[in-house]
Image: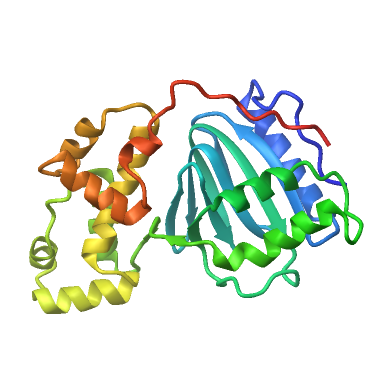
Amino acid sequence: MKPPSPSRLFLPESEELQRFHEDRVAMLETMTGPVVALPTKYPDGYFVPLHSHSRAQLLCASQGVVLVTTNAGRWMIPGDHAMWIPAGIEHSVEIVGDVYMRSIYISTDAVSGVPDYLHVVGLTDLMRCLIIDATMIDSIPEAGSRDALVIELILRDLHTLPQRSLGLPIPNDPRLQKLCRDFVKNPSSRVTIDDWADRLAMSRRSFTRHFQRETGVSLSVWRQQACLFAAVPRLSEGEAVTSVALDLGYDSVSAFTTMFRRMLGVSPRHYQPKSELAPTEYRDA
């Protein structure tokens, strides 16, 4: 058995949706079986405050953009991607655009070979179909049944999903943290290592080492990831690629597209609204 889902997935009041989420999180803790799969639809602007689960979570967005924040940083989950959230990690969730979300909650003893840190992954066509099927399973499946095979394949293939550079680690150094937060508010591809090194009165070499030590990535990679954070929600809301690219300081659309493809494996237009969207219908439990 799985927690109930609303028959009309857009709830009219945010408070009602918040109560629904809290009740479902509490009920999730009583669920048995290695995997619980839940579909939900959230409205644009909805915010889920800090919470955690005793199970690991594979949070999947099939439409819209999801932002996940922890003490360690921020991650973005565009459509057709998912985020691996290990058990016990406190996180908040912000919804950008109307989001169709499917979450797979997995017992800690049911999976191995998956990194024990938060990260975003790309979904293969097979995994996407398996996740959709899993949300239609109403009870613990019998061994050898089709539903049991769906669960088995999900657990077996989790570690094969390609990681994406969609995390934005936040440094602990207060000076660096301020620079990073200011950049997130006003991202630009033109910011250089020398710009930030000068502001902290550090040599280029010392700054480079310090930034890498604080964030785990180079400033160039961090800057590109921050630009993606700014770009994807705007693209998903229908803004022109040219407008987004120029606003982020890129000299040409082709330069922006090259960076985008390198980081996400698809062109910016992949995240723009489709002319027609057929919402997925979910079956109530």
- Residue depicted at x 51% and y 45%: 80
In the rendered image, residue 1, in percent from the top left (x then y), is placed at 88, 47
Image quadrant in which you'd find residue 206: bottom left
Query: Where 84 falls versus 130 (above or below)?
Result: below
48 with respect to 109 (left or right): left
Query: Where 107 falls versus 257 (above or below)?
Result: below
| Residue 55 in view (yes/no) | no
| Residue 245 in view (yes/no) | yes
15 with respect to 166 (left or right): right
In the rendered image, residue 89, in percent from the top left (x then y), is placed at 59, 63
Of 185 and 241, nearer the camera is 241
- Residue depicted at x 32% and y 40%: 268
- Residue depicted at x 22% and y 57%: 179
Q: Residue furthest right?
A: 142
Of 160 and 225, nearer the camera is 160
9 with respect to 83 (left or right): right
In the rendered image, residue 75, in percent from the top left (x then y), is placed at 44, 54
Image quadrant in which you'd find residue 241: top left
Of 233 and 121, nearer the camera is 121
224 with respect to 30 (left or right): left
